[in-house]
Structure formats: C-alpha cells, structure tokens
Image (spheres, helix red, strand yellow):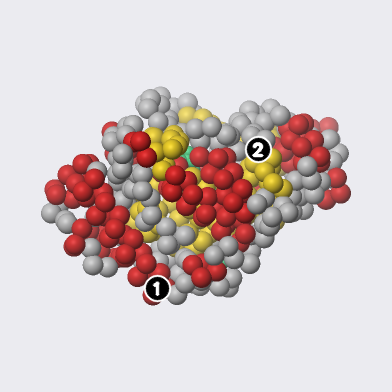
Amino acid sequence: MFWDEELETISQNKLKELQLKRLRDTIGRVYFNVPFYHKKFKEINIKPDDIKSVDDISKLPFTTRQDILDNYPTGLLAVSRDEMVRVHTSSGTTGKPKAIFFTKNDIDRAADLIARCLVMTGMRKNDVLQNMMTYGLFTGALVMHYGAEKVGILIVPAGPGNTERQILLMKDFKTTALHITPSYALYLAEYIKSKGIDPTKDLYLKRAYLGAEPYSEETRRKIEDIFGIDVYNSYGLSEMNGPGVAFECEYKEGMHTWEDNFVVEVIDPDTGEVLPDGQKGELVFTTLQREGMPLIRYRTRDISRIIPERCPCGRTHRRIERIFGRSDDMFIVKGVNIFPQQIENVLMSIKGVAMNYQIVLESLDNMIVRVEIAKDLFDGNVMHLVNLQNRITEELRKEILVKPKVELLEPGTLPVSEGKAKRVIDNRTL
Ligand code: AMP
Ligand code: ZN
C-alpha cells in the first residue's frame, strides 16, 4: 500500500522534471535570500538561470558541517526567523551544535515523508508505535512522532531507557512497532531474554524501525530472530529533517530516498567528483522543498551507494544501500583503514557473542575488541572460552587484516547509552 501512490511511483522522467522545477526554485531562493549562498555562487560566477538540468547541480558548491556551524544559529535562514516554528540541533561533538530551523510547512512535509515510510512498511491506523528515541533537541523522536500521527497511528512517546517500564507499556498498550536505536534494541533483546519473556507470545510486536546510527545486516537479523519481527532500516540526519530521508520498503534491500524532496548524489570524498550510480562514496543531499533552511549539496560524510536497479515494490525513487560507516568514523590500525561496522559484522555473526561490544584504540598498532558473550559460557568449560576467543580473533583478522586483542566479558559489563552508542574509545595520544 502507498501513502501517495502517484508520487511514489512517478516515472523517472516526470520525477526529473519535478526535481528540476523544485531545484531551480530552491536555488533562486537561496541566491536571493541567503547571503552565505549568494556569496558562494558569486565566487564561482553561477546564477540560478545556469541550472538547466538536475545534473547541473554538480556546478554548485558544497555545504559542509562547518558552514552550518559558522552560520550558527540563524545565518542560513531563507525566510524571516518569525516564520520558524521549531528548531532542532544535531549531536555536535564539542562546542556549538548545528541548528536546523523548520517552518510550519517544513514540519508538515517532514511528517508527510515519514507517513510514506510507515505506510510503505505496512503500518496502518490501528497500529501502535512505541517511540524509544530521545525526545527533545534531537530530531529522531519528534519527526517520527508527527509522521506517525499523520497516519493516525497511536504513539506511545516513551523515549529511551527504563527498560522495565518499556516492557509494561508494550504489554499494556499492545505495541505493534518500535522506533529504536540498534544499540538499544540489542540491549532490549538481551533484557527480554534474561527475564524469560517470549516476545512472540507475551508481546504484540510486528515490526521495528532501527536507525540513527550505523549497524550491520547481522544485527538486523539478530533482532528479527529474537523478537520474531520485521526490522526496517531508517536513515536520516538532522540537516535533512531527521528520519524519513531514506527508508526500506517490504523488500528490505536498500532504502528508498524520497527524490521529490531531495536530490541525492554520491561523491568521491577526496576529490568531490560525482560518482555514477552503483559506486560507493559519500552521500550528498540537496533539499528541494524546504522553506526555512534550504541546504545545497550538503556533505553528510556517510558512505553508501545508489542502487541502480529498480525495486520490485514499484516505487521509482532510487534506493541507497545500508550506510557503510561515516568517513570520520574510520580509524587506522597498522596502516589499515577500518570501519567499526566491519567489526560489528563479524561479531554479530559468531554464535555465543551477546549484544554489546566496544573497540579500544590503544596505539597506532594496537586495538582491543571488548565483547560481551553469553553468560552461560562463563560457567562452563574454560577451553570453550579460549576457543571462542581464538575464533573471534581469527575471524576479525580475516575481515580487517589486523589481529586485535580480544577480551570476553559478561553481559552487562559495557555501558549502554540511551542515545547513540559510543563504540570506539580512542586512547591514543598523538
Ligand atoms: P543526527 O543528525 O544527530 O540525527 O545524526 C545523523 C547521522 O546518524 C547520519 O549522518 C548517520 O551518520 C547516522 N545515521 C542515521 N541513521 C542511520 C542508519 N540507518 N544507518 C547508519 N547511520 C545512520
Ligand atoms: Zn521498494
């Protein structure tokens, strides 16, 4: 079923026409109303009329995270501050966060995209969505909330944490779907197991939406198996509204990006050159309908690729593959480039490994992988532990070409974060 069948299945030609119209409109608005863009466009001698096709977007300059910070808080607004009805900030590392403003129409459009996503995955009016993302400055919970409301779904705005209460809410309100970070989902799975709850008998869950941080296909499978549900990947970032930028359909093979709302490009992160569909690189998005704070060619630092093939579901909007990692998540050990997700892939595919892990970087040559394993393994034969440790070490070495030190821990030893998980601890001193 579709939320907006005509738009979701629009022909690629018509979609390109619509994109061009909206792109030209957006460029005109930022050129005349946002001094930052006016200056940038002037520097390279580009005028709105120079954009004659969607591909001409490659003539435009990028917007970076630093540009948003430099213009904090209101420097990138394209209409008066008085038109703004909401501000969200994105998880800044240190110092100032990135502020993203929304007009009333912007909020409504963001909700509309979520409505498409939820209906696409089978959600209907009679469903109950327990929203376990953090409510507040973070876009994750509120944007999903408004979208679900639009569909008419009952929302349980639980926020994260307090796991015992989450389970009560799931039982009492007959929750059918969860919106949750992968790391909290893994924790919840472990908790449910330890309490002897059988999700297929004691709960009413059918599906879960996992996003806000990278996770592996193995993690998805693990959650699906434990809860007996369908898990859908949900990708978004505050700069582009938060959730609803790209979402899996029933086929769960890549996430549809809503191309009537965004121009999606994949670039070579080193040269900035646009890569053809199918090639892996950094995702870049341009907003096509945003009034308050349009962004042109925003560099996400997220690594993925556009899937060139059409999706069997009939939607024409192109899909992107599961995010491989962030270009700034990558670390180097013994001269080898490693993404945390490669390690997660390996760990989650090994029997006996539980739900939580941490990567500790000790020096340029040494890393430790601390991994929680099933509790009963500690009560059994010590040789089993040694074998498991050796197996994990060997499987990791095969994947990342570096032999880490592996530490096995009891479940519950490592910290669980309520927001995004911090997987890598960097103790290196330069
Ligand atoms: P924020 O702006 O704080 O919501 O963070 C957005 C970032 O979270 C994105 O740029 C991605 O790095 C990450 N992220 C969000 N959803 C996913 C997902 N489904 N898979 C991988 N990473 C994600
Ligand atoms: Zn599809």
User: Residue at point 56% right, 58% down?
Assistant: 116
Say which amino acid is labelled 1: Lys
Q: Is residue 271 visible?
A: no
Q: Which of the numbered marks, if any, corresponds to residue 14?
A: 1
Q: CA distance from mark 2 to mark 1?
A: 38 Å
Q: Secondary structure at mark 2?
A: loop
Relative height, residue 136 to residue 107 (above, below): above
Say which amino acid is labelled 2: Pro
User: Residue at point 53% right, 50% down?
Assistant: 111
Mark 1 CB lies closer than 8 A to ligand 2 = no
User: Residue at point 40% right, 26% down?
Assistant: 94
Asked whether, in this view, residue 322 is left or right of residue 197, the answer is: left
Q: Secondary structure at mark 1?
A: helix
Mark 2 CB lies closer than 8 A to ligand 1 = no
Identify the residue position indicated by label 2 in the image: 157
Disc 1 packing (10 Å; few <14; some 14–19; many ≥20): few
Of 323 and 345, nearer the camera is 323
User: Residue at point 19% right, 46% down?
Assistant: 38
Asked whether, in this view, residue 306 is left or right of residue 412, the answer is: left
Question: Where does the image place residue 109, in percent across and percent down from the top left?
Answer: 47, 52
| Image quadrant where residue 383 sits | top right
| Image quadrant where residue 429 sits | top left
Relative height, residue 70 to residue 125 (above, below): above
